[in-house]
Image (spheres, rainbow, N blue to C red):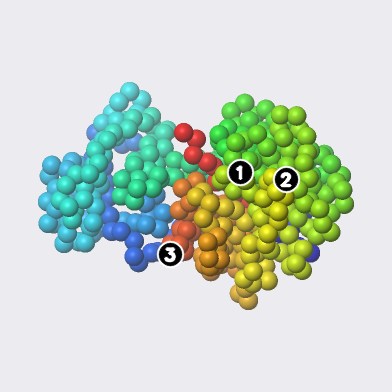
């Protein structure tokens, strides 16, 4: 059986173990010893304590990218709240390349958060801004700050203000309750989008970040739905006999690729959302599933076992040409293009298990990013620098986070039960 192609069945069976939806907490499993040392000084506060350690959230975000190594607070030589009191020579002594300082001033029902980024080696301030945030939006404010710092140093847009969707459930055996959830990228501020007593699979964000497509088994068989996140309004797009799975939005948001078996074998189709007309792309006796659009909308990557085992193939729209993209190893599935279109991220199998890997589309080089044994459903940050995926920790299903070079790894366990099927949101502005 093709594990990738029948992911919805695997999920349905695996879901009969205990699962639960909760805020998630990232734990470090491997750091990057080549990351940039940065000191994020606790922000000076004024007035009542806000209850959220904004500076710590900023430091955590930067560390999760794999590009930065925040200096432990116990090793900070001083705790300035503004840059005019910085002595760059002192910070050189603890090998800090950059220093972040800030101050929180009460403002209405929240805070005005002023922050500065200083280049220690260049001995100058390189960034100074502020953001206003209500008390319940302080984490969002911290993610914004981390985004600005990340962009200034790396010249790449930060993705810390984005979100993930994921599936979880509560109960056991026949008393399962499945939920589709949306949270911050790091698992905090989780909220429920949908609840069902049947499995929910394959969430996929629309390009504008306002809708989710997903598969639900409510009604006794799989169907593809699209749901508005703000209103909760949803529509059923397909409920054909057999497989209705793996929805994937086109970059322009006008079409949805999917895997349907209404003609017998699972094939890749594209639905025009304006009139719900279907165009069949593949036609073979193999299993074809897990479509994913290229950033330019001209190609669709998909998993097929037409060569005898699951591998990734690319369909070119217009010409209808299909070409095989993966050749290393007996199993490559669940592929997604990087946002710049230069790489594909996927699940590959070797003697030690299933791992998240990256393959260059220019030279075909494959880099295995994770060392865990049961990885699946990789999803890429919209800036291409981090990959979130489902994996196992003992008997518990958890989410993993790895930098795109594999040098930093984290695990994001739920406080109760299992979580699966992550999907990273796009940039929305």
* Residue at x 70% of width, y 48% of height: 319
Judge from the rendering whether residue 161 lies leftward or rightward of residue 418; answer left or right: left
> Where does residue 221 sit, x and y in percent of width and height?
82, 44
Quadrant for the N terminus in the image: bottom right
Task: Write down the residue under mark 3.
Answer: 407
Calculate the distance from the C-alpha at mark 2 to the C-alpha at mark 3. 33 Å
* Residue at x 58% of width, y 32% of height: 210
Q: Indicate which disc, 2 or 3, sits on the residue closer to the N terminus.
A: 2
Q: Indicate which disc, 1 or 3, sits on the residue closer to the N terminus.
A: 1
Q: Nearer the viewer, residue 280 or 201?
A: 280
Image depth: mark 1 or mark 2 in front: 1
Say if mark 1 contacts mark 2, CB within 8 Å. no
Calculate the distance from the C-alpha at mark 1 to the C-alpha at mark 2. 15 Å
Judge from the rendering whether residue 149 lies leftward or rightward of residue 197; answer left or right: left
In which quarter of the view is residue 137 placed? top left
Q: Residues within 10 Å of mark 3 (few under 14, many from 20)?
A: some
Question: Relative to 195, does residue 68 appear above or below in the rendering?
Answer: below
Q: Is residue 289 visible?
A: yes
In which quarter of the view is residue 113 placed? top left
Per the image, label 2 sits on a secondary structure element best described as strand
Q: Is residue 391 visible?
A: no
Question: Relative to 179, does residue 412 appear above or below in the rendering?
Answer: below
Task: Write down the residue under mark 2.
Answer: 258
Exactly how many numbered labels are in the figure? 3
> Where does residue 111 sit, x and y in percent of width and height?
31, 30
Task: Write down the residue under mark 1.
Answer: 297
> Where does residue 29 sit, x and y in percent of width and height?
46, 64
Q: Indicate which disc, 1 or 2, sits on the residue closer to the N terminus.
A: 2
Per the image, label 1 sits on a secondary structure element best described as loop
């Amino acid at each position: 059986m093709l594990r990738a192609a029948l992911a919805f069945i695997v999920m349905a069976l695996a879901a009969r173990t205990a699962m639960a939806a909760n805020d998630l907490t990232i734990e470090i499993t491997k750091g990057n010893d080549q990351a940039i040392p940065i000191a994020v000084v606790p922000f000076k506060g004024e007035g009542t304590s806000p209850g959220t350690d904004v500076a710590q959230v900023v430091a955590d975000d930067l560390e999760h990218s794999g590009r930065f190594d925040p200096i432990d607070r116990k090793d900070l030589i001083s705790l300035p709240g503004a840059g005019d009191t910085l002595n760059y020579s002192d910070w050189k002594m603890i090998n800090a390349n950059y220093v972040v300082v800030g101050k929180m001033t009460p403002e209405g029902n929240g805070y005005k958060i002023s922050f500065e980024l200083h280049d220690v080696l260049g001995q100058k301030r390189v960034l100074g801004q502020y953001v206003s945030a209500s008390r319940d939006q302080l984490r969002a404010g911290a993610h914004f700050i981390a985004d600005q710092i990340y962009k200034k140093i790396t010249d790449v847009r930060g993705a810390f203000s984005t979100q993930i969707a994921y599936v979880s459930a509560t109960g056991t055996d026949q008393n399962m309750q499945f939920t589709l959830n949306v949270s911050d990228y790091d698992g905090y501020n989780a909220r429920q989008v949908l609840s069902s007593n049947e499995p929910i699979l394959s969430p996929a964000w629309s390009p504008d970040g306002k809708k989710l497509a997903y598969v639900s088994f409510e009604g006794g068989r799989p169907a593809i739905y699209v749901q508005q996140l703000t209103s909760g309004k949803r529509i059923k797009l397909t409920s054909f006999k057999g497989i209705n799975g793996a929805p994937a939005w086109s970059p322009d948001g006008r079409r949805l690729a999917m895997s349907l078996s209404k003609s017998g074998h699972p094939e890749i189709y594209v639905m025009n959302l304006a009139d719900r007309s279907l165009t069949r792309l593949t036609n073979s006796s193999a299993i074809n599933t897990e479509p994913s659009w290229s950033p330019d909308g001209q190609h669709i990557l998909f998993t097929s076992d037409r060569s005898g085992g699951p591998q990734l193939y690319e369909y070119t729209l217009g010409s209808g040409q299909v070409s095989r993209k993966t050749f290393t190893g007996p199993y490559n599935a669940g592929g997604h293009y990087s946002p710049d279109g230069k790489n594909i991220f996927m699940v590959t199998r070797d003697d030690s298990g299933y791992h998240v890997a990256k393959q260059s589309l220019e030279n075909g080089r494959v880099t295995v990013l994770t060392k865990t044994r049961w990885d699946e459903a990789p999803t890429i940050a919209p800036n291409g620098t981090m990959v979130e995926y489902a994996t196992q920790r003992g008997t518990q299903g958890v989410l993993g986070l790895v930098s795109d070079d594999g040098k930093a790894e984290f695990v994001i366990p739920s406080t109760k039960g299992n979580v699966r099927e992550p999907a990273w949101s796009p940039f929305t502005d």
